Image (cartoon, rainbow, N blue to C red):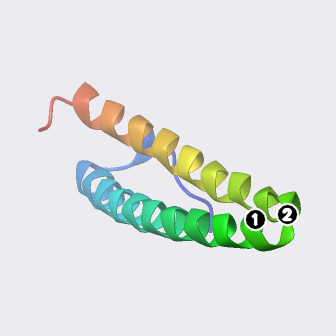
């Protein structure tokens, strides 16, 4: 399933997508914090190799944050608050 561009969505779809993305970002932040704690413990035991996992979780946060900004800009451009 291909995601529509924010400009092609109705206001209801934008609001629903905004809520979904905010929930997803909150979940990813929680997982990233837990992952960071686990990585620190593994780093103390095994060394530097375990730090490779962390950038992947940050990439997802950046992607979702950028999409959320696009949706918020589209909502603002339609003068809906």
Asked if 73 appears above or below 49 in the picture, the reply is: above
Q: Give how far apart the Cα atoms at labels 2 and 1 are.
A: 5 Å
- Identify the residue under disc 2: 47
Label count reads 2
Left or right: 4, with 43 as reference point: left
Q: Position of residue 2 (x, y in %)?
A: 62, 61
* Numbered disc 2: secondary structure: loop
The residue carrying pointer 1 sits among few (fewer than 14), some (14 to 19) or many (20 or more) residues within 10 Å by Cα, namely: some
The residue carrying pointer 2 sits among few (fewer than 14), some (14 to 19) or many (20 or more) residues within 10 Å by Cα, namely: few
Q: Which quadrant of the view contains residue 15? A: bottom left
Q: Residue furthest front?
A: 44
Residue at 42% x, 58% y is 25
Q: Are marks 2 and 1 in contact (CB under 8 Å)?
A: yes
Q: Position of residue 6 (x, y in %)?
A: 43, 43
Residue at 52% x, 70% y is 34
Asked if 52 appears above or below 39 in the picture, the reply is: above
Q: Position of residue 80 (x, y in %)?
A: 14, 36
Q: Which quadrant of the view contains residue 17? A: bottom left
Q: Residue furthest left?
A: 81
Residue at 54% x, 63% y is 32
Say the numbered circle drawn on residue 71: none
Say the numbered circle drawn on residue 43: 1
Residue at 23% x, 56% y is 12
Relative to the observer, which residue lies in front, 39 or 44? 44
């Amino acid at each position: 399933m291909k995601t529509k561009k924010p400009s092609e969505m109705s206001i209801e779809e934008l609001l629903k997508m905004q809520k979904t993305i905010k929930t997803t970002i909150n979940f990813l932040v929680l997982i990233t914090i837990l992952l960071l704690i686990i990585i620190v413990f593994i780093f103390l035991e095994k060394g530097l190799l375990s730090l490779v996992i962390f950038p992947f979780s940050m990439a997802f946060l950046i992607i979702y944050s950028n999409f959320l900004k696009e949706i918020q800009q589209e909502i603002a451009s339609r003068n809906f608050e």
